[in-house]
Image (cartoon, grey):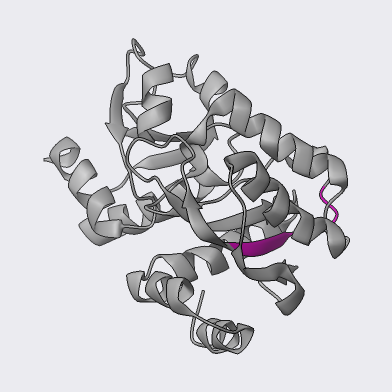
Amino acid sequence: MKILCVCGLGQGTSLILRMNVDTVLRQMGVQADVENTDVSSASSERPDLIITSNELAESLAGHPSTIVIVNNYFDLNEIKEALESHFS
Amino acid sequence: MKFLEKNLVELDAAVTSPDEAIQTAGNLLVEEGLVEEQYVEAMVQSYHKNGPYFVLAPQIALPHARPEDGVKEASVSFLRLMHPVRFGSAVNDPVHLVFALGASSSDEHLEILQKLMALLNNPENVKKLMEMTAYSEMESLLGGIHS
């Protein structure tokens, strides 16, 4: 399973998301390859899941990967709920 | 690395627009010599180009640009707005707390983000940031977090 966390610049916001996604996956006891990048690089990648914000999900409309939206990047429960259905 | 030190914190700034909020939070970093003035302009431009995705939790914005836009040292400033401002985020508006991030390309970048996450992953801390009346309260808050 490859997961890409996406933000506008691929510098700060997506790195925060990636670190919290890593934490949640550890808690769930699942293995995945998690990386972060900016929205324009993301369009040419084909991960299993893309995790991003509501706003950037709109710019990624039509992308072949499954897009998962997280609204609060600091809420580990929300991230867990968003991910769980993809690991069952 | 400079993380929420006294001169990087301003409570209840009277700003009225997202641009002004980003500039005021960014100027705290400029005044301490942590980023170039052009970095602040790059943060505003990134907002115009990429939208409000950096409003990454309810009421919280983390404007930043790229290390090559003029960062001298990994740093985070904090601006609490007197009146919340709408950045255009469908779910997290209005913004009340602005953390300007001086994104460096060094190892300190990861370290400073971990500090920020240790602070903001806890809703109790966010509540304290909303309610604090003096910098001394920030000091005790920072003393209690472990990243």
Residue B80 location (% of width, % of height): 56, 64
Res. A29 in view: no
Q: Is A85 above or below relative to B136?
A: above
Q: In this view, does A9 lie above or below B61?
A: above
Q: Nearer the viewer, residue B28 or B110?
A: B28
Q: Does the magenta stretch include residue B73?
A: yes
Q: In which quarter of the image is residue A64?
A: top left
Left or right of A2, for residue A39: right
Residue A67 as seen in the image, left or right of residue B145: left
Q: Does the magenta stretch include residue A51?
A: no
Where residue B142 sits: x, y (%)? 56, 81
Q: Position of residue B58 (x, y in %)?
A: 37, 52
| Residue at 13% across, 39% down | A85
Question: Can see residue B30?
Answer: yes
Looking at the image, which residue is at 70% across and 58% down?
A: B107
Residue lying at 46% horizontally and 42% vertically, measured from the top left: B86
- Expressed as whole percent of the image width and height from the top left, the position of residue B143 reads 55, 87
Looking at this view, is A3 or A1 the one in front?
A: A3
- Residue at x 35%, y 14% (from the top left corner): A61
Span shown in magenta: B71-79
Along the viewing direction, whichever of A84 and B83 lies nearer the viewer: B83
Displayed quadrant of residue A23 = bottom left
- Label total for image: 0
- The quarter of the picture where the N terminus of chain B appears is bottom right
Outermost residue, left direction? A88
**Extreme-top residue of the structure:** A62
Displayed quadrant of residue B47: top right
